[in-house]
Image (tube, helix red, strand yellow):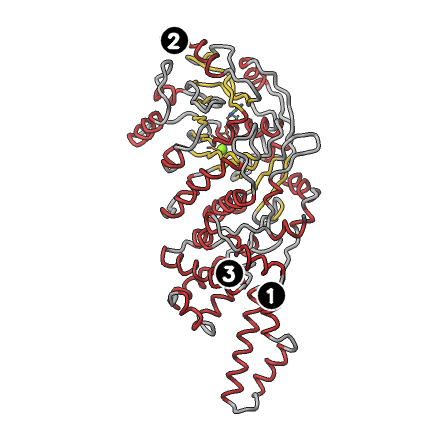
Amino acid sequence: MADFAETLAQGYTFAGPSLTLGAPLRDGEVATSTLVRIPLGMMNRHGLIAGATGTGKTKTLQLLTDQLSAAGVPVFCADLKGDLSGLSRPGVDHPKIHARSTAIGVPFVPTPCPVEFFSLTGVTGHQLRATVSAFGPLLLSRVMGLNDTQQSVLAMVFKYCDDQGLLLLDLSDLRQVLVYLSDEGAGQLAEYGGLAKSTVGVILRKVVELEQQGADQFFGEPEFDVDDLLRVMPDGRGVVSVLELTDVQERPALFSTFMMWLLASLWRELPEVGDPDKPKLVFFFDEAHLLFDGASDAFVGQIEQVIRLIRSKGVGVFFVTQTPKDVPADVLGQLGSRVQHALRAYTPDDEKALKATANTFPKSEFYDVPKALTSLGTGEALVTVLSPKGRPTPVVATLLVPPTSQMTPIPDADLVAAFRSSPLFATYAQPVDRESAREVLQRRMEEAMARDDAETSGSEPGPKARSRQRRKAEPDLGDQVGKMLNSPMAKTLGRELIRGLFGVLGLSTSRRRRR
Ligand SMILES: Nc1ncnc2c1ncn2[C@@H]1O[C@H](COP(=O)(O)OP(=O)(O)OP(=O)(O)O)[C@@H](O)[C@H]1O
Ligand SMILES: [Mg+2]
């Protein structure tokens, strides 16, 4: 049998910068002075942080975030339960923390991260927004829970708007287009495979529902500029963007698709970098099962592709979830680093899940993997990562270092004060409502109604039609459409309208305005 200390020393000694996970454990004791580390350059090879509730997954996310930021790598993480705001404060020394650090042999140096808070409601962070058009039909279908037929109809509606240069900025634009297509503009659908009017009606109802649930806030402008996730402080630390989701916890389809939109947008906007020395961004997807629950095969297929392709843009994605089974096999197969916290094995189903998890680990000479998985303590995990050469390192039970930022959340008032005093506040606080599909179509319909009225009452327009015409006043519809088609945005639309993964449109209007 190979020597444990020697195997670990060989497996975990890398040249170049790395992140420290902790110290190797055997039979509950720190067994060798070799530290368990992840090469920084391998952080874009994606990863999994898994384990039962309360075993330390979020703290693992936090300790990695602390060290990534310190190494100059920006981080994005979603905060579902409101326990990540402490990232913005230095950690607090405590006898338990002290004992842990001493056992590992890494001094505890309390250090805050530069944090920027975002939210989907604008209450607990900068308002994240996407235009309906850029969000695309596939993600929107997922948010609205559309079936395959409805989804393909929605895709056609988007195609129609793209072709017509109709800007879908917010949900009211989409609603107006659907109203138009199920009435006045129904004839226009013939070219699009004759979309069923009834399906358009169903989608319309779903859009109205979505608006009523308050989701209209995160569709519109100013659209979020993904460059804001890639910031590095003047002192070289990577900015940590925390998406506060406690206020939309009950809308998993919404925030998980929103995060996919961010990833797909990053993929579209970032240049290829191959295998950089360190990632451009590391993206933590907490409660990742919510992304996959009930998702169609097509949707999961797109996720697989985003994950596969975004690596060469220098973005690492870490999924955080209870068991590896929550993540589809094709995605799981792409995850280079594994931090597997304890699993429980109370029921036959638990047993099965445990076996399945154990089977996803490389063979170990030193551990009985299923047994190790059930006997790990809090803040301990079975680890295997990729060496700088891309080979899996030996499986090792690890006593994880404590996060150097604060483990408890900061008071709500402090969080709100922090994001309101940030320079980004001015950029995203106020929604902008500019000329888009709603205004154009409203006029188009009004004009048609006025025409109808005029026809039914002979050559003289009736009083109703006259009043409508008065309201419409000067701007002629032809002019309006022409103006819109000639606007810089529409010109860009006309020229470069290419939908990428998830049908996400690769133009960030806010970017063009600001940069
Ligand atoms: N690396 C660590 N250093 C110090 N303490 C830790 C560490 N990891 C976990 N703990 C302790 O364990 C507790 C639970 O950890 P954590 O909140 O990360 O669990 P979790 O797996 O994310 O739980 P949940 O499934 O409920 O989200 C922490 O509050 C902390 O006291
Ligand atoms: Mg957690």
* First-in-chain label (2 vs 1): 2
**Neighbour class for label 3 at 10 Å: few (<14), some, many (≥20)?**
some
**Amino acid type, residue under disc 1 in the picture:** Met
Q: Quadrant of residue 63?
A: top right
Pointer 3 with pointer 2, Cβ within 8 A: no
Q: Distance between the residues labelled 3 and 1?
A: 13 Å
Residue annotated with mark 2: 2
* First-in-chain label (3 vs 2): 2
Question: Disc 3 on helix, strand or loop?
Answer: helix
Q: Quadrant of residue 68?
A: top right
Q: Nearer the viewer, residue 352 or 489?
A: 489
- Residue 9, percent across and down? 48, 12
The quadrant of the image that shows the N terminus is top left
* First-in-chain label (3 vs 1): 3
**What residue occupies the far front of the structure in this picture?**
495
Q: 135 above or below 267? A: below
- Residue 69, percent across and down? 61, 30
Residue annotated with mark 3: 162
Residue annotated with mark 1: 484
**Amino acid type, residue under disc 2 in the picture:** Ala
**Amino acid type, residue under disc 3 in the picture:** Asp
Question: Disc 1 on helix, strand or loop?
Answer: helix
Q: Distance between the residues labelled 3 and 2?
A: 63 Å
Q: 240 above or below 367? A: below
